[in-house]
Image: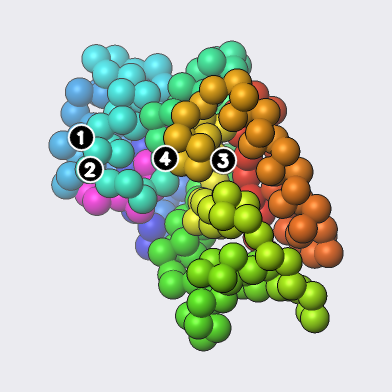
């Protein structure tokens, strides 16, 4: 049974969401006061955090930052009534994995929760343990030490930066990766020049992976990328 730390100050909405999730088999711990959330987080050790952004005493963005200091892996889903891009960007920069705008359907909330839980579980596994140094990417094999991407009988030798970029995308597969995080991790700074350079590298990787239609490097407009691996 997955444990959810659900933070929501609209008590009527919170009760509906909590009751519905519990009826579906989740264990839900609800908190309405931002100042009390970190104590609850320590007590519960949740499998996922669902955080409203607008909260009394301490907002969801501050809480995400504090949660990330304690736990780098637990998925964080933001709930927000605001639609501005700045709010979404701020959420990802604080460590969020996904967001959902209010009002939302319970079906969509549960799909997003299940998706984040599944992705987190798969990302903790040792990738392609039975293939030595090879990482399986759909119908491709990616050998990081050799910087080689293989498909059937063909091999593509990657540059160091191409290999590092593909590795980073794979390590964060399924999650939305902010552009600034990717730039800092691979290029060391997020200058305009490096940003345009990264766009070129992303286009190259898409070309290298085109033989498997199930592999996608999605552009999340105004935010970053998401690498879909079957």
Callouts 1 and 2 close, C-beta under 8 Å: yes
Residue at 37 percent of width and 24 percent of height:
61
Q: Which residue is mark 1?
A: 38
Q: Which residues are magenta?
A: 44-51
Q: Position of residue 214 (x, y in %)?
A: 77, 61
Q: Position of residue 42 (x, y in %)?
A: 18, 44
Foreground tag (3 vs 1): 3
Q: Earlier in the sequence, mark 2 or mark 3?
A: 2
Label 4 Cα crowd, 10 Å radius (few <14 / some 14-19 / many 20+)? many
Q: Earlier in the sequence, mark 1 or mark 4?
A: 1
Label 3 Cα crowd, 10 Å radius (few <14 / some 14-19 / many 20+)? many
Label 2 Cα crowd, 10 Å radius (few <14 / some 14-19 / many 20+)? few
Q: Which residue is mark 2?
A: 70
Q: Which residue is mark 3?
A: 176
Q: For the residues marked 1 and 4, what is the alpha-carbon distance in whole angstroms?
A: 14 Å
Q: Position of residue 124 (x, y in %)?
A: 41, 64
Residue at 24 percent of width and 15 percent of height:
57
Give the secondary structure at mark 2. Answer: helix
Q: Earlier in the sequence, mark 3 or mark 1?
A: 1
Callouts 3 and 4 close, C-beta under 8 Å: no
Q: Which residue is mark 4?
A: 76
Left or right side of 134 for 121: left
Q: Position of residue 118 (x, y in %)?
A: 51, 60
Q: Please, is residue 94 above or below residue 140 in the view?
A: above
Can residue 140 be spotted in the picture?
no
Q: Nearer the viewer, residue 131 or 158?
A: 158
């Amino acid at each position: 049974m997955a444990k959810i730390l659900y933070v929501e100050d609209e008590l009527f909405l919170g009760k509906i969401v909590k009751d519905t999730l519990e009826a579906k088999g989740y264990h839900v711990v609800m908190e309405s006061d931002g100042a009390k959330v970190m104590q609850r987080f320590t007590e519960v050790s949740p499998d996922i955090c669902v955080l409203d952004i607008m909260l009394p005493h301490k907002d969801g963005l501050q809480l995400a930052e504090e949660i990330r200091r304690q736990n780098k892996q637990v998925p964080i889903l933001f709930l927000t009534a605001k639609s501005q891009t700045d709010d979404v960007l701020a959420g990802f920069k604080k460590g969020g994995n996904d967001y959902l705008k209010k009002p939302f359907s319970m079906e969509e909330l549960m799909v997003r929760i299940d998706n984040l839980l599944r992705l987190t579980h798969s990302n903790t596994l040792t990738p392609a343990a039975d293939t030595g140094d090879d990482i399986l990417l759909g119908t491709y094999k990616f050998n990081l030490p050799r910087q080689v991407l293989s498909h059937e009988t063909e091999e593509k030798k990657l540059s160091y930066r191409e290999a590092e970029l593909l590795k980073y995308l794979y390590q964060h597969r399924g999650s939305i990766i902010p552009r600034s995080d990717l730039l800092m991790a691979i290029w060391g700074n997020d200058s305009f020049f490096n940003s345009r350079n990264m766009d070129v590298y992303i286009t190259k990787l898409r070309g290298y992976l085109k033989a498997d239609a199930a592999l996608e490097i999605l552009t999340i407009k105004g935010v970053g990328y998401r690498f879909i691996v079957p």
